[in-house]
Image (spheres, rainbow, N blue to C red):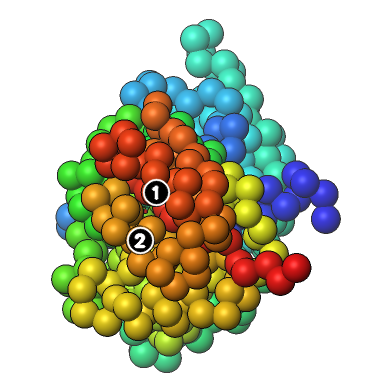
Amino acid sequence: MSDVQRRHEHFMQMALDQARAAWQMGEVPIGCVIVRDGEVLGVGHNKVERYGVTRHAEIVAIEAAIAHTGEKVLPGTTLYVTVEPCTMCIGAILLARIDVVVYGAAEPKTGACGSVYDMHDHPKQQHRVVVRSGVLAQECASLMQAFFAEARTGEVGHNVAATPPFTERRNTTTGTLHVVPTPIGNIEDITARALKVLRAADVLLCEDTRHTGQLLQRYGGIHARLVSNHEHNEAERAQTVLRFLADGNNVAMVSDAGMPAISDPGYRTIVACIQAGVNVEVLPGPSAFVTALVGSGLSAERVLFVGFPPQKKGRGHWLHDVLDGGRATVVMYESPYRVEALLADVAAIVGPQRRVCIARELSKVHEEYLRGTVADVAQAIAARGGLKGECVVIIDAAHVE
Ligand code: SAM
């Protein structure tokens, strides 16, 4: 499959997600996505408005894209829609100066059935739209057929699960939970894909909505509803999250920094989604422990990541357990105020000559790695009167000579 075809199918799958959301609301399943340079500017699906009038997916998406960009017209964009646009929508597409229309299934009753749409009867309104048809045509057509079959039998429910499987989908009953890592210090450490997913999200699960709000403000174009999902409410939130997904919402999850579920909330939500058959998509990205491990210069061949050590109860046993045998490089998170005490405990178990590294303030202005034996590093920290900032502690494996 060519890159162009793959891109078309990717965005048509998003349009199909919108179409399924329309069905779940009892509407004809037609969905639409508007894209410029790989960025989703607007999405829409058929919606019943006041007086029972349906607003077509294309119109909803054009309005969303105009609101998102602040532009009056949308040159350079491609509009993906699951079914060939009706003549009214073609008018709107021409007026919006959209350049390309890609549709899935042909609709002989309502479609304009053209391969190029022209608008040239007004000197100021000359525009030409190139049309490409048949992308995921079967999936788009099947969705429509299943909807109308259901309507004929009078069982108009929201049985989206009855539709035939879409290609490249692992799950057809609910959406996808997108797990999105965010920067651990340097705000520029966010991937283009992470921003794309965040901009396409309807609901964004955040550890702290104010903290995430700052990140969103920096990048703009993210209009998702922020929903708190922290250590203390994550278990109860899971059902709400599943409902959001079942209602056709695009759901993404972030934590305050780094990878969700790594010493952060996220694990319970992920498990609930897996158990409910929801597709979980994790985007690769920043995490302090991987960065620290690689920068430590200690072996990354066999690694044990243990999160934060317990502060009091069972700390001694816990440390013995993770360090015992020395078969792996051990990586842990620790408060800077407890690092000296931790090094003393480590020395008592593995001896003062074991190599360690403290990776501090990664990706920030004062980033540094303190490398050496436990004794050397402890001495260096004592000499500067303690540590500040965020720290990762990496302890070498035992090396038998
Ligand atoms: N989810 C995050 C991740 O993927 O790394 C970890 C969150 S955990 C609550 C926060 C701890 O990660 C900090 O106390 C520190 O040990 C470590 N950490 C986070 N950012 C860091 C940074 N920039 N430099 C060093 N350690 C960091």
Residue 167 is left or right of residue 191, and the answer is right
> Disc number at residue 344?
2
Q: What residue type is labelled 1?
A: Ala
Name the residue rendered at 51%, 80% in the picture: 324
Can you identify the residue that label 1 sits on?
Answer: 378
Rendering coords of residue 96 (x, y %):
46, 28
Q: Position of residue 369 (x, y in %)?
A: 49, 40
> From the viewer's perspective, is residue 91 above or below residue 332?
above
Q: 121 above or below 88?
A: above
In the foreground, 280 or 20: 280
Quarter of the figure with the C terminus: bottom right
- CA distance separating discs 1 and 2: 8 Å
Label 2 is placed on what type of residue? Ala
* Residue 78 image position (x, y, % from top left): 58, 37
Q: Can residue 171 be seen in this view?
A: yes
Question: Quadrant of residue 211 in the image?
Answer: top left
Q: Are marks 1 and 2 in contact (CB under 8 Å)?
A: yes
Res. 306 image quadrant: bottom left
Along the viewing direction, whichever of 178 and 167 lies nearer the viewer: 178
Q: Is mark 1 on a helix, strand or loop?
A: helix
